[in-house]
Amino acid sequence: MTAPLLRPLRLGGLELRNNLALAPMAGITNAAFRVLAAGGGAGLVVTEMVSAESLKYGNRKSFRMLELLPGERPAAIQLFGADPQSMALAAQAAERAGADIVDVNAGCPVKKVRRSGAGAELMRSPQLLADIVSRMVRSVRVPVTVKFRTGLEAGENLAPLLARVCEEAGAAALTVHGRPASQFHSGPVNLEHLAAAAAAVKVPVFGNGGVGNAEQARAMLEGGCSGVAVGRAAVYNPAVFAEIAAGLSGESVPRPSDADRVRLFLRYLELNAGIYGEEHGLARARKLVGYWLKGLPGSAGVRGAFMGLKTLKEAEGLLIQYTRKK
Ligand SMILES: Cc1cc2nc3c(=O)[nH]c(=O)nc-3n(C[C@H](O)[C@H](O)[C@H](O)COP(=O)(O)O)c2cc1C
């Protein structure tokens, strides 16, 4: 009998309630956002990437990025770095902070990260990646997972090899972004490359890239991926996980109305204010406002006005026009 496409997933000793994960996004998947994604049906949420070297030197901002809220379990903390010892120490810090999973970033295409030998650069050095993963696995009790891409350049598929290397080093699951690093976050996702990676290993593989609805998730799952990780579609709608879950089960849930989306955004602002204080919390939200309000009438003007806000009351005043319409 074939397994249902939507299903609980076991990663090492951890049971996820479903196989739909929030993909890590720097500047976006902070604790406030993760709470909304977990509430929106994600079976696993992942932090922004945190620098192992910054943790090693006691950087306060990086330690704050390890803080988890009660409403976001289970949560993975993602780390980036190129030194096995620093990564092992960072994994221990993440475990102490309460991470259910520690994830290795081996796919970040950003120049600054790659120049330090981390992120996608690790795909060039399978032996170093294996050293990092095995050292981390020996240093913590929680499962260690790895996220990488199908290749560095268009056309190549390094994912099956890297998947085997990570599995042998002790990784409990993998996330593979189906675009090469050279494409950053745009362009087509190669489903065949993802299927080949999933077929190469026994551990669960989350397919990632361009999934925003049940049909797109189905294509990855039918190709052999055990789960799906959703990035930008969740920024537009943090409840997209529930929508995908319903679609995979042959059901449907109503799409959130514009008013619902704005109410959720206000909830995000409140959570952000609780973490960073009102003014800084609103500043952090600037990166999201474009995604979140996309498609709402007059959103360009509202987005512009949002950039100057300092208090939650002002934000409510600006956004209330949308919530009143329903
Ligand atoms: C703004 C932004 C920040 C990202 N930051 C990270 C990160 O910190 N770690 C990581 O592994 N991937 C990061 N990614 C990649 C996403 O996790 C994901 O692989 C990519 O967006 C493709 O999925 P999507 O098409 O569903 O958005 C980021 C992507 C975006 C758009």
Image (cartoon, rainbow, N blue to C red):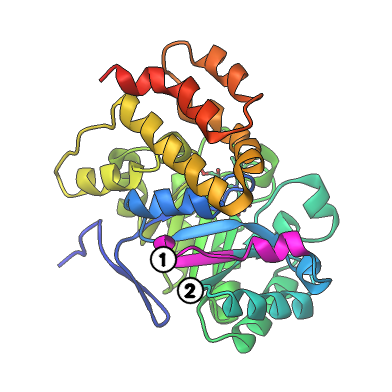
Q: Position of residue 169 (x, y in %)?
A: 60, 81
Residue 209 seen from this side: no
- Kind of residue indicated by mark 2: Asp
Magenta-drawn stretch contains 283: no
Residue range in magenta is 60-77
Residue named by callout 1:
73
The residue positioned 35% from the left and 40% from the top of the image is 216
The residue positioned 75% from the left and 73% from the top of the image is 128
Relative to the observer, which residue lies in front, 228 or 316?
A: 316
Magenta-drawn stretch contains 69: yes
Residue named by callout 2:
100
Res 301 → quadrant = top right
Q: Is residue 98 above or below residue 270?
A: below
Q: Position of residue 240 (x, y in %)?
A: 34, 41
Marks 2/1 in contact by CB < 8 Å: the verdict is yes
Question: Label 1 neighbourhood size at 10 Å, few (<14), some (14-19), many (20+)?
Answer: many
